[in-house]
Image (spheres, rainbow, N blue to C red):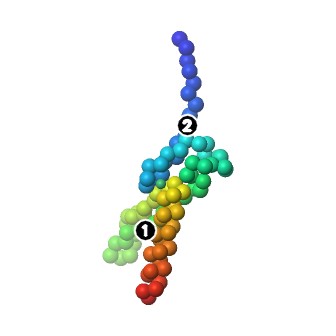
């Protein structure tokens, strides 16, 4: 009987658009749309009537470069619009 060893492979997947890359994670010269480690996290805690935290309501997404850039533009535009209104 012959055996074959298949090396483990790590695939990075954007949580939003599904873009995938199997380039080595520690490659600093990547050109696969994952040149930054981008994670969007909104930390929220649901409170009860006494103001005590009762549940995690956080949202977190790992993003490719393009999705991170789009999210950054949306957040900045939203914040500027809100600041103007106040
Ligand atoms: Zn993406």
With 22 as the anchor, is 42 left or right in this view? left
- Residue 39 visible in the snapshot: no
With 68 as the anchor, is 57 left or right in this view? left
Tag 2 secondary structure:
loop
Which residue occupies the foreground of this view, 48 or 73? Answer: 73
| Tag 1 near tag 2, CB within 8 Å | no
Q: Which residue is mark 1?
A: 44
Of labels 1 and 2, earlier in sequence is: 2
Name the residue located 48 percent from the left edge and 65 percent from the top edge.
Answer: 71
Calculate the distance from the C-alpha at mark 1 to the C-alpha at mark 2: 34 Å
Name the residue located 47 percent from the left edge and 75 percent from the top edge.
Answer: 77
Estimate how packed mark 1 is, as few (under 14), some (14 to 19) or many (20 or more) residues with alpha carbons within 10 Å: few
Disc 1 CB within 8 Å of nearest ligand 1 atom: no
- Image: 42 above or below 63: below
Name the residue located 57 percent from the left edge and 24 percent from the top edge.
Answer: 5
Residue 9 spot, x, y in % from top left: 55, 37
With 45 as the anchor, is 7 left or right in this view? right
Which residue occupies the foreground of this view, 13 or 2? Answer: 13
- Residue 55 visible in the snapshot: yes
Residue 4 location, quadrant: top right
Residue 47 spot, x, y in % from top left: 37, 71
Q: Which residue is mark 2?
A: 9
Name the residue located 55 percent from the left edge and 18 percent from the top edge.
Answer: 3
Residue 49 location, quadrant: bottom left
Tag 1 secondary structure:
loop
């Amino acid at each position: 009987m012959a055996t074959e060893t298949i090396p483990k492979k790590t695939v990075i997947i954007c949580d939003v658009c599904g873009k995938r890359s199997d380039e080595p994670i520690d490659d600093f010269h990547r050109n696969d749309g994952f040149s930054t480690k981008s994670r969007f996290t909104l930390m929220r805690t649901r409170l009860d009537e006494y103001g005590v935290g009762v549940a995690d309501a956080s949202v977190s997404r790992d993003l490719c470069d393009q999705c991170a850039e789009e999210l950054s533009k949306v957040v900045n535009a939203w914040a500027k619009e809100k600041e103007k209104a106040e």
